[in-house]
Structure formats: C-alpha cells, structure tokens
Image (cartoon, rainbow, N blue to C red):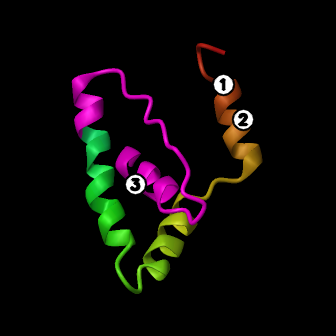
Amino acid sequence: MDAVALAVAMAQPFRPMVLSGAATVEQMASNAGALQLLARLREEGAEEQLAGLLAVAKVAPEAYWSERQALAWN
C-alpha cells in the first residue's frame, strides 16, 4: 500500500516532491515499488487506473482524524 500511495502522489500533474518516510532498508525497498507503478500510471489511458486507485484509497476526514487521535504516540 505504501508504494501505491507514493506512486499516486508522484503522478499528480503539479509534479510534487514526495518524501517516503522510510526508516529501514525494508521500508525503502518496499517504497521503491512506487517507481514501477508510477511508470504504469503514466502510460496512455492510465487516468482511469489512477482514478480507481484514488477511489479505493479515499478515507473520510472524520475517520482519518479519529484513527490518528487513537494512536499510542498521540
């Protein structure tokens, strides 16, 4: 899921700079999968794929903030 989130962020038309937050070699390796997915998202006709990924990943703001507030480090 981390690679999907990074690829979707990098595929935005305003060309953002995306920081992964990886802290271990394993996390970095997992995040690197975003580059392959990004290449697929940039292919012709990929707007539908991107819209589908965004629809699946969408979380209501109330649910997001409720989950964040419940985290132990908060």
* Amino acid marked by disc 1: Ala
Is residue 65 inside the magenta stretch? no
Rendered position, 73 above or below 8: above
Which numbered dot is residue 4? 3
Could you tell me how far apart the alpha carbons at marks 1 and 3 are, in whole angstroms? Answer: 24 Å
Q: Nearer the viewer, mark 2 or mark 3?
A: 3
Q: Residue at x 48, y 81 (%)?
A: 48
Q: Is residue 26 left or right of residue 49?
A: left
Which residue is located at x 26 percent, y 50 percent? 33
Assess whether residue 7 is covered by the magenta stretch: yes
Q: CA distance from mark 2 to mark 3?
A: 23 Å
Say few, some or many: other residues with alpha carbon within 10 Å of mark 1 (under 14 / 14 to 19 / 20 or more).
few
- Counting residues from the start of the chain, the first of labels 1 and 3 encountered is 3
Q: Specify the label residue 27 is tagged with.
A: none
Q: Residue furthest top?
A: 73
| In the rendered image, the vertical position of residue 46 relative to residue 63, given as above or below | below
Q: Residue at x 40, y 54 (%)?
A: 4
Question: In this picture, which residue range is highlighted in magenta?
Answer: 1-29
In the image, which disc is placed on residue 66?
Answer: 2
Q: For numbered disc 1, what is the local secondary structure?
A: loop
Q: Is residue 22 above or below residue 43?
A: above
Residue 35: x and y in percent read 30, 54
| Label ID, residue 70 | 1
Q: Is residue 26 left or right of residue 52?
A: left
> Which is in the foreground here, disc 1 or disc 3?
3
Q: Are there few (<14), some (14-19), or many (20+) residues within 10 Å of tag 3?
A: some
Label 2 packing within 10 angstroms: few (<14), some (14-19), many (20+): few
Amino acid type, label 2: Ser
Give the mark nearest the N terminus, 2 or 3. Answer: 3
- Name the quadrant of the C terminus: top right
Identify the image quadrant of residue 39: bottom left
